[in-house]
Amino acid sequence: MTETPSVQRLRPARQFSGVVRPPGDKSISHRYALLAALADGRSTIANFSTGADCHSTLQCVAALGARIEIGAAANAASGASGDGARAITGHGRRGLHAPAAELDAGNSGSTIRMLSGILAAQPFASRISGDASLRRRPMRRILEPLSQMGAQITAAGGGRPPLAFTPVAGLRGITYQPQVASAQVKTAVLFAGLFAAGETIVAEPQPTRDHTEIALRQFGVALDFPARNRIALRPPAAELAPQELRVPGDPSSAAFFLCAAAMLPEADLLVDQVSLNPRRSALLDVLRRMGARIGVVNIEEQNGELAGSLTARPPESGRLQGTQIAAAEAVALIDEIPILAVLATAAEGGIRFRDVAELRVKESDRIAAIAANLRRMGAECTEYPDGLDVPGPQSLRGAALDSCGDHRIAMAFSIAALTAVGDSEIHDPGCAAISFPEFFPTLARLTGE
Ligand code: S3P
């Protein structure tokens, strides 16, 4: 990783225009890496996420015996272009071996939760943990279904990492209805289902991102959808087939720039090659109903996932309209709420967020982090246990801001700084590299700094 200063200074933007190609989608990269490690043979993955979280997944699967090739080596053999390629060679579902040491998921909730579905089924013992933020995050949501399937897992106090897995002879399929709408929980259960006797069914309380379902099918696993929001999997007789894959750009990384373009006068942005998966595209609906001019060009399908390019400009009238976000839309937008809270300050009537209690248990307590930073910029907002009201329009003043070690807070408030009166500084900005190491250089290019 490149060295990052401990403080990032940011000036109000004088311009905001250009072309952005976001890093490969983080969610899809994790899933491709995990499934490639279970497949029998060599998969190639072009445009793999450059974020530190996906690197954590690669290191974990390498420690479990998958062979990883990075950059030129992976490119040369796969014919993929660019430096974002990875090749992963797995040895089938029974081909993993015991790691020599505790697995390190770093800051990545996706890594620990999704990989747990695989570790739970192994005939060897393992342990997995991560950084201080990850060790505070709730794991009962995966421990409960995996235990019902016959896994033996112990967690530290309060159901938090580290997690220790005892070898098991086999798992059994279950029908599981998670309490929280979580794609990570769904994935952990479906991945465990690849090793289980009989059928595994997940009945989601709300639809969550469906990259796991799409990727499983891509690797040759048949799924059934017996009812709305129900996914059924039977472990296939054949091994998962290795694949040649390309990851579309990350819409949650693009979100920071799309919202900046909606807010900044005269902005003109093209986001090239980004995921247009409908379960990740709710931000586009919100931006449009707020009045921003959003265009979609060149839609194509890659490995079952939709991708394309987007254009973004502020409303013709110059004024964004406020809105409300709750229920299913809140689930679909969960990673975009920090930047939407910043956008709210520029909208007539602001934004009322509800049903976002999950934000309290992300990489930081994001509701508290958003509220604290908005107040530092002189903005008003009201916090609720499961929500936030951000009135608008309100003008922001430059301030000393705190990322709270959370990548999405660092990036959201960097955009806030562009719209402020006066200079700002973001403390601990290096965490942006968790999902988007190129964020600050890209921002400097778009603002002409
Ligand atoms: C993710 C699911 C979401 C999201 C996270 C990535 C995934 O988490 O917030 O950034 O890749 O499945 P939950 O499953 O906890 O909702």
Image (spheres, rainbow, N blue to C red):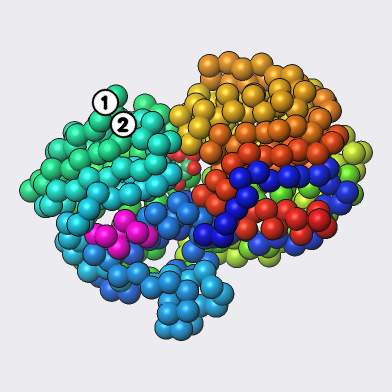
Quadrant that contains the C terminus: bottom right
Residue at (43% x, 77% y) in the render: 74
Magenta stretch, overall SS: helix
Work out whether 146 lies above or below 237: above
- Quarter location, residue 77: bottom left
Mark 1–mark 2 distance (CA, rounded to whole Å): 6 Å
Q: Residues within 10 Å of mark 2 (few under 14, many from 20)?
A: some
Q: Is residue 402 magenta?
A: no
Q: Is residue 305 left or right of residue 343?
A: left
Residue at (48% x, 36% y) in the render: 363
Q: Which mark is residue 157?
A: 1
Q: Is residue 211 left or right of residue 162?
A: right
Q: Nearer the viewer, residue 153 or 43?
A: 153
Q: Amino acid at mark 2?
A: Arg
Q: Amino acid at mark 1?
A: Gly
Residue at (83% x, 57% y) in the render: 448
Instruction: Provide the secondary structure element on which disc 2 rests.
Output: strand
Q: Nearer the viewer, residue 265 or 328?
A: 265
Q: Residues within 10 Å of mark 1 (few under 14, many from 20)?
A: few
Q: Which mark is residue 160?
A: 2
Discs 1, 2 touching: Cβ within 8 Å: yes
**Percent from the top left, x then y, of residue 94?**
16, 61
Q: Nearer the viewer, residue 51 or 299?
A: 51
Span colored in magenta: 58-64
